[in-house]
Image (cartoon, helix red, strand yellow):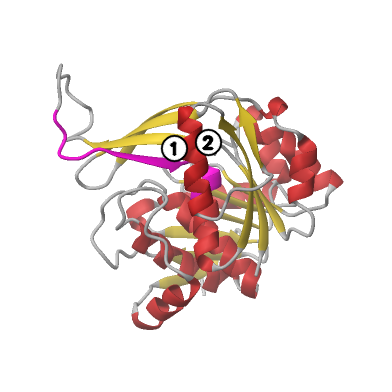
Amino acid sequence: MPDITIVGMTRLAMTMPVEVFPLPYHAYRRPSWMRCAVVGGSVNVGSALKSLGSDPRICTLVGTDEAGEVIRATLRRHGLEGRGVVDTPESAKTVILVEPDGRVARSASASGVAQEYPMERFIEQSVDADLAVISSTPFGEPFLHTAKNLLGLPVAVDLHVAADLTDPGQRPWFEAADVLFCSHERLRLPPAEWIGEVLGRYPGCQLAAVGRGEQGCVMGLRDGRLVEIDAVTPRPVRSTDGAGDALFASFLHGWLSAGEPVEALESAVLFAGWKIGAETATEGFLTGGELAALRRVYPLRTRVSSWLPGRDGG
């Protein structure tokens, strides 16, 4: 059972449907549904890992306000509350809008900064951990040095849409990451080229992957392999919110459990494809047994080539 420490934000979210983006102005809307949920990298990734059988330990800030009471109740229900959950005066919040095809847009407020988080709690939560997942937000940056240089832990980072290799503000995460995931949405290069740039520029990075939404996922490994897996949707899509976190979490669980990155990514693509049939970011997670059973009956298309210049696919 992998032991994974997770550093990230936790937010109270209000989710509602919209007809189309960009959103036309109306003084009053009557949506067909609205939902309140607890989301954020720490709870999204932690809940997925817990469902699969890993032991996640989250390090996050939660307000002592009314929103914080809801957040803590959710963390308890998911088995994620512990000493790594630290008080702050006000909880972070977000509003999520969902199009009929599942595409989402969000506005988020962050409360609390990393300086408020006692680093000794992170160290305590990381004893005997196999890996640290560090948020790519400013909240996560101070934890990078402690994880890598003090504790000697491998670090996994999901950059989401902040994957610009030319941005000096992102350099600490690129330099620290052993495992690097990101979204294709704002890449300035094709995914395979971006992966080649990352692995060529940052020798400490062992693998880099790009989630491409309905096109699937591409991953480059330090040994030169480039793995492309087509997306699958075993059930109708309800919301893509949290799909990237589900892909990331499932990959880490499978990779740490068995050490086979290609097989782990195949399972992760299927896990994320099933998850987006749920309505919120913290629902729709398969257990390890359910995922294994689905793997036996659901086809996946995988192609392996090379990201190294001058090498042909195989």
Q: Residue at x 50, y 71 (%)?
A: 304
Magenta stretch contains residue 222: no
Residue 168 spot, x, y in % from top left: 66, 28
Q: Quick one: SS at disc 1?
A: loop
Front-lying residue, 171 or 291: 291
Label 2 near label 1: C-beta < 8 Å?
yes
Q: Nearer the viewer, mark 1 or mark 2?
A: 2
- The N terminus lies in quadrant: bottom right
Residue 98 spot, x, y in % from top left: 26, 39
For the residue carrying disc 1, how many other residues have a C-alpha within 10 Å: few (<14), some (14-19), or many (20+)? few
- Residue where numbered disc 2 is placed: 162
Left or right of residue 167: residue 71:
left
Residue 23 falls in which quadrant of the image?
A: top left
Front-lying residue, 189 or 21: 21
What is the total number of numbered labels drawn onto the structure image?
A: 2
Extreme residue in the right direction: 150
Extreme residue in the bottom direction: 296
Magenta stretch contains residue 36: yes
Which circle's residue, 1 or 2, is located before the other in the chain? 2
When the figure is inspected, residue 269 is found, relative to residue 21, above or below; the finding is below
Residue type at mark 1: give it.
Answer: Arg
Magenta highlight range:
30-44
Left or right of residue 1: residue 29:
left
* Residue 193 visible in the snapshot: no
- Residue where numbered disc 1 is placed: 186
Residue 20 falls in which quadrant of the image?
A: top left
Residue type at mark 2: give it.
Answer: Ala
For the residue carrying disc 2, how many other residues have a C-alpha within 10 Å: few (<14), some (14-19), or many (20+)? some
